[in-house]
Image: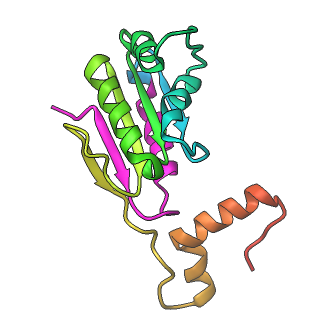
């Protein structure tokens, strides 16, 4: 049986988010209700994790309702994968919410990214190795083909379209 909670772990900048989004895109057609992204990087308060997840679905929590209960009710019948990105600074709150969601929403799967595992029952942890560094040989060619440099160039071009590695 496959795990319904998979956590991609590794050091910062290793490509966990990129890998999670690629995987979510590939498995999305197998989930009737699609793939959804909840980004936790800007969430500073553990009490706001449930609001961030609800926000990923544009779910309005009814006045007086407990946010976690409203989220569970909304997701209970859904067949989807939820990517929860950047859990490391809110690990306790993220783990508690993810655990509650997957135990109540039996057709839901979670793909999390964190610098460490969440310690959720049944969690499968996949360590994302560091990107390869330039090898020996022609220095410029080695640099151009290394994974670390390719990621740097992709990010640089996203900021300045005219960027060229030289």
Q: Is residue 87 left or right of residue 119?
A: right
Q: Is residue 164 left or right of residue 36?
A: right
x 57%, y 90%: residue: 138
Quick check: is 19 in the magenta stretch?
A: yes
Up-down relation of residue 148 to residue 67 (above or below): below
Quick check: is 144 in the magenta stretch?
A: no
- The reply to whether residue 106 is visible in this rendering is no
Residue 96 image position (x, y, % from top left): 33, 35
Based on the displayed image, in which of its 4 quarters is residue 94 positioned? top left
Could you tell me which quadrant the N terminus lies in?
top left
Up-down relation of residue 163 to residue 108 (above or below): below
Residue 77 image position (x, y, % from top left): 36, 9
Q: Residue extending furthest front?
A: 64
- The reply to whether residue 21 is visible in this rendering is yes
x 38%, y 22%: residue: 30
Q: Is residue 125 left or right of residue 20?
A: left
Count of marks placed on residues? 0
x 24%, y 44%: residue: 124
What residue span does the magenta drawing correspond to? 1-28
Residue 13 image position (x, y, % from top left): 52, 63
Q: Residue extending furthest right?
A: 162
103 or 44, nearer to the observer: 44
Residue 12 image position (x, y, % from top left): 49, 63
Up-down relation of residue 159 to residue 29 (above or below): below
Could you tell me which quadrant the C terminus lies in?
bottom right
x 49%, y 48%: residue: 86
Q: What colour scheme does the image use?
A: rainbow
């Amino acid at each position: 049986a496959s795990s319904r909670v998979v956590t991609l772990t590794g050091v910062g900048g290793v490509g966990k988010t990129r890998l999670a989004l690629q995987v979510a895109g590939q498995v999305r057609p197998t989930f009737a209700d699609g793939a959804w992204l909840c980004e936790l990087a800007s969430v500073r308060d553990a009490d706001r994790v449930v609001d961030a997840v609800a926000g990923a679905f544009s779910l309005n929590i009814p006045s007086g309702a407990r946010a976690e209960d409203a989220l569970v009710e909304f997701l209970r019948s859904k067949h989807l994968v939820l990517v929860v990105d950047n859990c490391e600074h809110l690990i306790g709150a993220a783990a508690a919410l993810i655990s509650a969601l997957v135990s109540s929403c039996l057709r839901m799967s979670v793909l999390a990214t964190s610098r460490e595992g969440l310690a959720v029952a049944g969690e499968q942890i996949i360590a994302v190795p560091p990107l390869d560094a330039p090898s020996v040989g022609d220095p410029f060619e080695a640099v151009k083909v290394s994974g670390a440099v390719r990621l740097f160039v992709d990010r640089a071009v996203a900021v300045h379209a005219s960027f060229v590695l030289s």
